[in-house]
Image (tube, grey):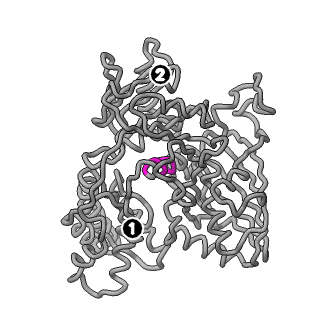
Amino acid sequence: MSADKHLKSWQERFEMAEAMQPIIGKLYRNKGVEVLVYGKSLLNASTIDIIKSHRLVRKHEGEKLRLRESFPFLEALSKLDVRYARIDLGKLAMNYWRNHTDGSEIESYVEAEMGPAIEQELEQRDVVLYGFGRIGRLLARLMIERTGVANSMRLKAIVVRGGRDGDLEKRASLLRRDSIHGPFNGSIEVDEENNAIIANGTYIQVIYSNGPDQVDYTQYGINNALVVDNTGIWKDEEGLGLHLKSKGVAKVLLTAPAKGDIKNVVYGVNHMDIEPEDMIVSAASCTTNAITPVLKAINDKFGIRNGHVETVHSYTNDQNLIDNYHKGDRRGRSAALNMVLTSTGAAKAVAKALPELKGKLTGNAIRVPTPNVSMAIMNLNLAEGTDRDTMNEFLREVALHSELQSQVDFTESTEIVSTDLVGSRYAGVVDSQATIVDGDRAVLYVWYDNEFGYSRQVTRVMKKMLGLTTHVIPS
């Protein structure tokens, strides 16, 4: 009987998750509403993903959230004209059941919680990816997976050098298959005649150009666009400003640290510094995005007198596959065979997003023979002493309930390794089992997918630059 009971319970959960899938899909495609459970997005989630997301609630809250307890909230949500919001179904349901014994008031409760997200109007804006390397292709995937009539950011074109025979098919193939992040979730077609890639119904014009100022985007029906420069070639105002000379361009975002007075933005920390008149903005680096939210939280709570950040970073395309000439020290040695000690400006770059830490941090980096996922080891001297449990509990709360909940994740696993973090949508993941605290000295270990997690941060900066507002509910 026990075996039958477990099987019946599993069947009920599976069927409930299956019933949730079409509602979750329609909410996003038709209304721009993304559904989550304690920070885990259910967009394009499998039935197993939905079940697992509910099981994880017990780790956070100490009590179960059953699918049959959350499903009525999803149904109530589908009946409202809610638009452009990220709604945490898990938190919404748990907040309700803490104060209610039955579900008679669920619909009125959900409607009251939605507030300004009901009937919100939002314009759609054009986006161009200038460069189509690792970050460019992941940004494309992120925008395409959110394709729908309610999608606020429309990927209209990619700009690359070249134009040789077979180039278009090769670009499409690299989008279709990825050795690290797996196959593209959908269908991709190539329109050779019109130089375009069609991905999940999104028509993406492929434009060949040798310079940022040599494209007339308006001839492709692209206007007032945000150009996201993924090339890393131009990093100052003069170089990036060339984009603004092309017809149809309104603003430029750099996916690398910028030089000069360009704002380096880490979403969640200083994104409010972006003004409507800012034409050129930088999304900083993957490492800066990984460490700054955690550093901000710790500095706000305990204070940071000084510290050192050591990055254990997967190798990148800048390094050599085998020993060969490289202008940088040590980077000419085989990336696949060596740990390579190198420099990083990430620690100093933190000050651009978090000025109160200016001059307080040093940093170095070790490139290691893994293709993706990195770790930052932060050795900090605190202004206020604490202990390991207090530190971990604080960071857990930051990950679950603070304004940094979309940037900081938290794991209690004793078995997690780098490959487990491939595809993480967070800027950084605190490894609580590795935390060391001794009075005013703390050592923290923060994992990050230096490709995907960073790309997700970039999309957030993109929305802010375009003035697109997404309500987070519960806040």
Left or right: 233 in relation to 69: right
Look at label 1 and name its amino acid. Answer: His
Q: Which residue is mark 2?
A: 214
Toward which corner of the image does residue 28 lie, by quadrant? bottom left
Toward which corner of the image does residue 155 lie, by quadrant? top left
Q: Nearer the viewer, mark 1 or mark 2?
A: 2
Residue 54: mark: 1
Element marked by disc 1: helix
What residue is at 35 percent from the left and 54 percent from the top?
A: 43
Left or right: 450 in relation to 116: right
Determine whether 64 is above or below 13 in the image: below
Crowd band around label 1 with a 10 angstrom C-alpha radius: few (<14), some (14–19), many (20+): many
Q: Which residues are magenta?
A: 457-463
Main SS of residues in magenta: helix
Determine whether 280 is above or below 115 in the image: above
Q: Is residue 21 visible?
A: no
Quarter containing the C terminus: bottom left
- Mark 1 and mark 2: span between their CA atoms? 51 Å
